[in-house]
């Protein structure tokens, strides 16, 4: 009878430790998710675009186009640089209100 009480107490203690770890991880990940969400909403509001995932992905694509255009111009590839810059400006123009 006494052995059953020991294992029951040990199980409760282990369960409390697991519950504590899960609650801590849940709180930390929730705080990180809220921070990322607030950052993306602030970025979208400052630029003047919607804060949907599609808009954020298009913003990344537009910035990559602009980056490729600047790199092409630095390599003295004028035509390629102008094309990349125009594509980037078109994408960024669609996003910004």
Image: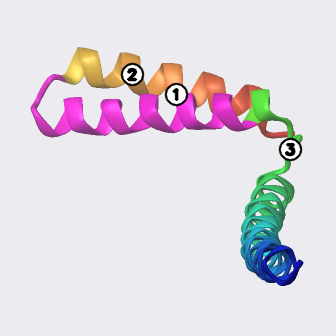
Q: CA distance from mark 1 to mark 3?
A: 19 Å
Of the numbered discs in the image, which one, if any, rests on residue 88?
Answer: 1
- Is residue 61 or residue 20 the one in the foreground? 20
Quarter of the image for the N terminus: give it.
bottom right
Q: From which residue to which does the magenta span run?
A: 56-77
Label 3 Cα neighbours within 10 Å, binned few <14 / some 14-19 / many ≥20: some
Q: Is residue 57 left or right of residue 18?
A: left
In this picture, is 85 found above or below 11? above
Residue pictured at 38% horizontal, 16% vertical: 83
Majority SS type along the magenta span = helix
* Residue drawn where x is 79% and y is 39% of the image: 96
Residue at the outermost left position: 75
Q: How many marks?
A: 3
SS for dot 3: loop
Other residues around mark 2 within 10 Å, as few (<14) / some (14–19) / many (≥20): many
Placement of the C terminus among the 4 image quadrants: top right
Helix, strand or loop for disc 1: helix
Q: Which residue lies under the disc numbered 2? A: 84
Q: Earlier in the sequence, mark 2 or mark 3?
A: 3
Q: Secondary structure at mark 2?
A: helix
What x and y, as percent, mark residue 72? 21, 29
Residue 81: x and y in percent read 29, 25
Instruction: Say whether residue 59 is magenta.
Output: yes
Residue 65 placed where, x, y %? 44, 28
- Which residue, given by chain and number where applicable, does mark 3 sit on? 51
| Alpha carbons under labels 1 and 2: distance apart | 6 Å
The stretch drawn in magenta includes residue 91: no
- Picture quarter containing residue 16? bottom right
| Nearer to the camera, 79 or 48 | 48
> Depth-wise, is mark 1 or mark 3 nearer the camera?
3
Residues at marks 1 and 2 touching, judged by CB atoms closer than 8 Å: yes
């Amino acid at each position: 009878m006494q052995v059953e009480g020991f294992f029951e107490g040990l199980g409760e203690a282990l369960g409390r430790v697991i519950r504590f770890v899960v609650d801590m991880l849940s709180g930390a990940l929730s705080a990180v998710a809220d921070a990322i969400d607030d950052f993306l909403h602030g970025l979208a509001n400052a630029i003047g675009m919607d804060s949907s995932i599609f808009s954020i992905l298009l913003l990344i694509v537009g910035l990559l186009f602009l980056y490729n255009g600047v790199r092409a111009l630095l390599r003295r590839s004028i035509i390629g640089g102008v094309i990349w810059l125009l594509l980037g400006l078109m994408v960024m123009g669609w996003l910004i209100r």
